[in-house]
Amino acid sequence: MKNDGNMVEVRNLKMYFPINRGLLQRKVGDIKAVDDVSFTIKKNETLGLVGESGCGKTTTGRCILRLYKPTSGDIIFNGHNISRLPESKIRPLRSGMGAIFQDPFSSLNPRQTAGSIVADPLRIQQLVPRKEIPEVVAELFRMVGLDPAMMDRVPHEFSGGQRQRLGIARALATRPALVICDEPISALDVSIQAQIINLLEDLQEKLGLTYLFIAHDLSVVEHISNRVAVMYLGRIVEIASSDELYHRPLHPYTRALLSAVPIPDPRLDKQRQRILLQGEVPSPANPPSGCYFHPRCNYAQPECSQVIPPLKDVDNGHQVACIRVKDGLF
């Protein structure tokens, strides 16, 4: 299957979780965690996926890893449609994927040694002979800036930053082409965050990795991403290159998010206009009609409550899902 330079292509992805109630646990509805999402990730690029908590970012990443079986839609990974493959056929493809999780402590088995944690993917996938595993693990430790002498330690003997480096080493054990980074620095001290970001960038250049970088910190995403996709209530509302999105946001929700990003210069921070959104994020179990954002949008018109805006290209790959955006302007 031809992929035109794309490592991942997601088409009309939906992930609904059933709501069951009563003694017989009858289905009474769905939580629409991901609702008709489409995007691509090119080889060797970093796509940032941003949005508020609960918007479906992590669920999207887990669908790509096939930790969740999608309700509908297609996920093309390296030319293979994995959205409906049985587990037996997905397993060989999983060696091409890695995952770095948000909490570097809860994602590591506290009873295993660090060396055993990193070696697990190698044993499961049977990628190297058993006698060579210790040397491969030692090399992975060195690659992420850890001393191989620490292989016999358990996770609680590491600092937070070291534990995340351990998680990165585990993610890279199978030499994946794609790594899903699920808020990999949000649980770390600010002083450590920059070190982990720099490590991820160095590894990407050295190993030719492709990243899906999930985060809610827009300043971090701007630094590491080539392109950025903005999610709201299970849908993507805007996709553009990092420079384009941060300098010319078009969707009202993106503008509101960027207006809340702190600016180091107090004088510039006072001069800019903050955009305050109305109300609360609706429930994904009962989303609004039409554009999901319209109840909170300062530019909403009656038509917005009736029409689901498609994600349209308005200018050189800058895609926006808003009926009020025309020719790149409101």
Image (cartoon, rainbow, N blue to C red):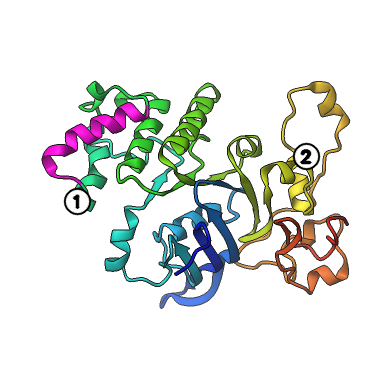
Task: Tell whether position 245 is magenta.
Answer: no
Span colored in magenta = 128-144
Q: Position of residue 288 (x, y in %)?
A: 71, 67
Secondary structure of the residue carrying numbered label 1: loop
Query: Could you tell whether 165 is left or right of 223 in the image?
Result: left
Q: Which residue is mark 2?
A: 259
Three-letter amino acid code at disc 2?
A: Ser
Q: Position of residue 213 (x, y in %)?
A: 53, 45
Residue 38 - label = none
Q: Is there CB contact under 8 Å for labels 1 and 2? A: no
| Other residues around mark 2 within 10 Å, as few (<14) / some (14–19) / many (≥20) | some
At x 20%, y 27%, the residue is: 152
Task: Tell whether position 137 is magenta.
Answer: yes
Residue 126 - label = 1
Q: Quadrant of residue 83?
A: bottom left
Image quadrant containing the C terminus: bottom right
At x 61%, y 39%, the residue is: 221
Q: CA distance from mark 1 to mark 2?
A: 49 Å
Image quadrant containing the N terminus: bottom left
Q: Is residue 24 above or below residue 252?
A: below
Three-letter amino acid code at disc 1?
A: Gln
At x 40%, y 46%, the residue is: 99
